[in-house]
Amino acid sequence: MTGVAANDTLNVRAQPNGSAEKRGTLAHDAKNIEVTATNDAGTWGRVNLGETSGWVAMRYLARHEDNPDYALAHALTCFGTEPFWSADITQGQGVAIRTPETQIDIPGAGLIVPASGRTDLYALGFADSSAQIRRAECNDGMSDRMFGLQVGLFLRHDQSATLYAGCCSIAMH
């Protein structure tokens, strides 16, 4: 966050304009705000706020890194429904996958690798399983939140294989 006074907050709007309905606020010192999309002009960014999403003026957000793949180089939290599942992917450290029935920890996951010549598609291999991550709008189906990453997680475990589909969020550790 930048340019917001210590005694002020940044408004989160329902639409990308200053007169739209206010959905909430972000503290003046908020950090690691994930922008999941921008308007065509790039002047407003969509962010998640609780169980909803809204728009903030980009002039108040400072880019964490100039590299657009920076966040993918660290960690992701992914999740989906039917069945409910979640996965924490920490590059080079491992993957933790949870369902209502089980938790599977796979240490030493490989690198998140961009597809050759593409900026919207990534792959991650671990053990005999894999994930494909794509920059694209994604909704969790349970809230009004929107995400900027889709995932397909192919998991082999105990003589079976399952494909999980869902959304990912950048997780800053």
Image (tube, rainbow, N blue to C red):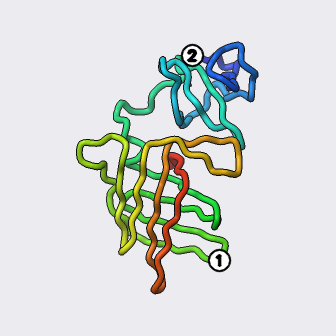
The N terminus is located in which quarter? top right
Eyeballing the image, is 18 above or below 66?
Answer: above
> What amino acid type should be assigned to the residue bearing mark 2?
Gly
Q: Within 10 Å of the Cα at label 1, are there few (<14), some (14-19), or many (20+) other Cα atoms?
A: few
Which residue occupies 62% across, 18% down? 4
> What amino acid type should be assigned to the residue bearing mark 1?
Glu
What's the CA distance linking mark 1 and mark 2? 46 Å
Residue 116 horizontal/vertical position (percent): 24, 47
Residue lying at the far bottom in this picture: please name it. Answer: 159
Eyeballing the image, is 159 above or below 129?
Answer: below
Say which quarter of the image contains residue 138: top right
Which residue occupies 53% across, 47% down? 169
Please name the residue that numbered disc 1 is placed on: 101
Q: Secondary structure at mark 2?
A: loop
Front-most of 27 and 170?
A: 170
Residue 123 horizontal/vertical position (percent): 35, 56
Which residue occupies 42% across, 65% down? 94
